[in-house]
Each structure stands twice: as C-alpha cells, then as structure tokens.
Image (spheres, rainbow, N blue to C red):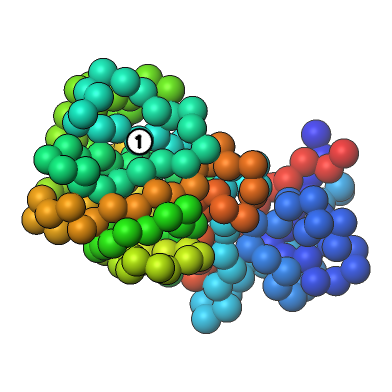
Amino acid sequence: MKGILVAGCRPAIFMASCAAGLSLFGCAQVSYGPRAPGEVLAPAPSEGEPGCVTIERGVHGDVKDARIGAQSPDRNFGHLGTTFAGNTGRWERMVLLGFDLSVLPSGAVVEKATLHLSQATVAGGPFAVHRATKPWEENRVTWRSFGAAFDPEPEAMLWGRPGDSGGLEADVTGMVQRWVRDETGNHGLVLRPSSGGKAASVATFFSSESAAEVDRPRLVVCLTHAPLTTVPRN
C-alpha cells in the first residue's frame, strides 16, 4: 500500500487531508524532502511549534465514560447522555472517563494535556480528578465492581460555581505524560466531589453519548515533537 506522510497541511496539496482529519497536528507549514515512490515527506512540528490532537468520540479517537453511584451499587449508567458527580446526602457518585491514546504517534512528546467537560447543571464544586488504577468497561462498570480503584492523590481540580454555564477545564499533563510512557497504565480517570463529604460538590456533565458534538468530553493533547506518521493513500 502506498502512503503519504503528513505532519501538517497548510499548502494546497494537503488541504483535503486536513479537512478529512488525516493530519493529527493541525495545519502547520510543510516542507518536502527526498521521497520514495508514492510518498511525500513532511516534517513533524518542530520544538516550539507544537501541534495538538483532540481525542473526542465521533471526532477523533475513542472515548468511554460512565457514572457510578454508591446508592445504586450494582447499576450501570454508561449509556446516558449526561453523567453526574457529587454528593447527594450521604451518597457519593463519581464519573469515569477513558481516552484512547493510541491515536498519538509513537515517540510523541506531550507538552500539555487538558481535559474539557461541558456542564449540564452545576450546583457547586470543586471536583477532584484522580487516576484510575484498574480497567473498566463503559456499559458494565458499577460502583461495586470498580470499588476505590483510583489513586487517592488528585491529579488536578475542576472548579464549578452555582450559576456557571459552559465548560470546565483541568490540566492533566503529568498523568497523560505517564500514560504515553507506559500505555498499560492508562485506565482513565475518575472525577469525584472534593468537599470533604459535604453536599456542596454536585454537577451534571454531558457524556460522550450527547447528541451535540460540542458538549462531549474531550482531551486535547499538545505535542512538542512527533515523528512522521504514515497515512494510507486511497
């Protein structure tokens, strides 16, 4: 199979590839070097000129998410269009999120990684982002099956206030860098209330099942370097 090596697509020859989502690094300037038959060589983004990859269901890559709750320890909520984190009385609910990093090229160096969530309703905050420590399946995981399978030390915090609308962001660079170095350790993350058991931390977020693409959870990973990637030519 012949290939085309793409790192960006600003020149006209690459505009179709960029529109089709074949370039993972945005539309950086492309220069050409020696090429084998059927191949075009284009450099990866250079140091100081990072490109970013957005991992979002229906856009690029694979994402899974589910809510689990202590009040319904054996129920699965992975199919719903919204997901919920917070304390309702003495019952805690958590959100699980998983992002498949296999869409990143081998050898990529992560400069920054940002988690983006869209709020459906917010009654308070903050929310802690923890690293999950065991595998789970979106349409099977429950509170009982997952247990407390997360690192107790939070990786980041999400802040929401009553009356807020729009999105929340959290810097999860360190966690994603570790996942890139060791793919076997990527079991996703856990979003849970961080209010010492008080009922103040409560929020509903849109899930990957949301009909509106713009509302789905996404992970934006910016790279300082990535090797050339071969994309099949039709």
What residue did someone put label 1 on?
Answer: 67
Location of residue 123 in the rendering, given as x and y in whole percent from the top left corner: 32, 59
Q: Residue furthest bottom?
A: 48
Amino acid at circle 1: Arg
10 horizontally vs 44: left or right: right
Instruction: Relative to 217, say whether 159 is above or below.
Output: below
163 horizontally vs 38: left or right: left
The residue shown at (85%, 71%) is 11
Instruction: Relative to 110, say whether 147 is above or below.
Output: above
- For the N terminus, give its image quadrant: top right
Q: Residue furthest left?
A: 196
- For the C terminus, give its image quadrant: top right
How many residues crowd around disc 1 within 10 Å: few (fewer than 14), some, or many (20 or more)? many
Location of residue 232 in the rendering, given as x and y in whole percent from the top left corner: 77, 41
17 horizontally vs 220: left or right: right
Location of residue 112 in the rendering, given as x and y in whole percent from the top left corner: 42, 68
Q: Is any atom of residue 143 visible in this view?
A: yes
Location of residue 18 in the rendering, given as x and y in whole percent from the top left corner: 78, 59
**Secondary element type, mark 1:** strand
